[in-house]
Each structure stands twice: as structure tokens, then as C-alpha cells.
Amino acid sequence: MLTLWFAPRTRAVRVRWLLEELQVPYELRRVEFQRPAQAFAQQTPLGKLPVLEDGAVVMCESGAIVEYVLEVHGHGRLAPPIGSPLRGAFLQWLHFAEATAFPPLGVIVWHALYQGDADANPGAMAGARERAASALDFVERGLGADDYLVGNTFSAADVMMGFTLLAARLLGVLDERFPRLGDYLARLESRPAFQRAAEI
């Protein structure tokens, strides 16, 4: 059985959400999130959150874990197959969520929540909010009138993006400027698997 090292309101929600959507059995190892002083050091086998154990495999990085779970336990679900015309868009959004959309949010979290020095760094905060809004605008336009990111069908790319949008909303970046994303996030939050993962 898989073991997921988990703390609420962390990227571990992504992995738990995916496992719930796929109905893959797993053991949840809850840990308390350790607020960083200078570096992240969590009480998990790799010092990170999330961490997934699958026999001899022990890994971190939520995006990598999502890909691994799809490959090993997904049985073709929640991802277009290799060679599909939709595969490129799937991989784009899967990685955009963490590689492009989340970094400016991380800057905001670091200064506003962890270091408490946001007021002393107005330029960094303003720049991060501008970059975050630009990333959200890209997703808003990419989503268009569809319900989901890839082929109008729910996929693991929505799992990755959903967590990023939750963080953006919490930080006040996802607002009325992005009505399609607001509706999209509401659809994601209505999913029973999400509600179990996020412990709503």
C-alpha cells in the first residue's frame, strides 16, 4: 500500500486528491507543518512535503509524484495517453501549475506569512503579484469556455492547477478579474475527492 506523508494546506493535498480520484488505497501519515525559518525541514523521510512511499520508491515533489502515480497506479485514467493530441496540453498545464503559476505566490507567502517582512519589501511583493496575475490570465485565456483544462475532461492537470488556484485565492490574487477561473475552481471544489483531500 502507498504511504502519503501529509499536512493540510500543503502541496500534499494535490497527491491525496489524486489518490482519492483514482480510488487508490493509501495510508495517510499526518505530520504538523513546520514553518520555515530559513529553509524547509519537515518531519518526513525526505524532509519535504509531500513524500510518497511505494515499496522501495520514496519520493517528493508533488508534480513528480502525480506523474508517478498516474504511470504506476492510474491505469490510463486522468491523463491522455502518450501519443494523443491532447498529451501536450496535459503536460503543459500539469507543469505550468507549479513551474510558472506558483513561484510568485511562493514569494508572497515567504514575505507575508513566513518572514513577516512584506511591508519592508514592497517592490518584491508588487512584482510577485503582477507575475501571479499574468500567470492566472494565461490560464483564464487557456481555459476559455471549457469546464476543464484538457479536452474539456477532468484530468490530473486540474488537480495540479486546482491547488495553485486555491493558494492564489487565499493570497488575494485570484479575484473578480478572473471570472472563468473562479467558476472553474468552484467546480473543482465541488468534487467529493477534493473535499476529502482538503478535509472540507
Image: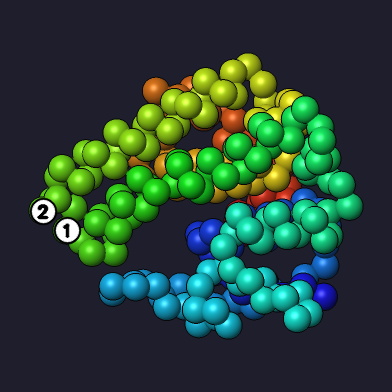
Circle 2: residue type: Ala
Per the image, label 2 sits on a secondary structure element best described as helix
Circle 1: residue type: Asp
* Residue drawn where x is 14% and y is 50% of the image: 121
* Residue drawn where x is 58% and y is 83% of the image: 45
* Residue drawn where x is 78% and y is 79% of the image: 55
Quarter assignment of residue 162: top right
Colour scheme in use: rainbow
Disc 2 to disc 1, how far (Cα)?
Answer: 5 Å
Query: Residue 120 — which label?
Result: 2
* Residue drawn where x is 51% and y is 24% of the image: 140
Residue 56 pos. (x, y %): 75, 81
Residue at the outermost front position: 83
Residue 120 pos. (x, y %): 10, 53
Query: Residue 117 — which label?
Result: 1
Of the pair 109 and 195, the residue shown nearer to us: 109
Dot 2 surroundings within 10 Å: few (below 14), some, or many (20 or more)?
few
Per the image, label 1 sits on a secondary structure element best described as loop
Of the pair 198 and 119, the residue shown nearer to us: 119
Dot 1 surroundings within 10 Å: few (below 14), some, or many (20 or more)?
few
Q: Is residue 72 left or right of residue 97?
A: right
Q: Is residue 123 left or right of residue 44?
A: left
Q: Quadrant of the N terminus?
A: bottom right
Residue 28 pos. (x, y %): 69, 74
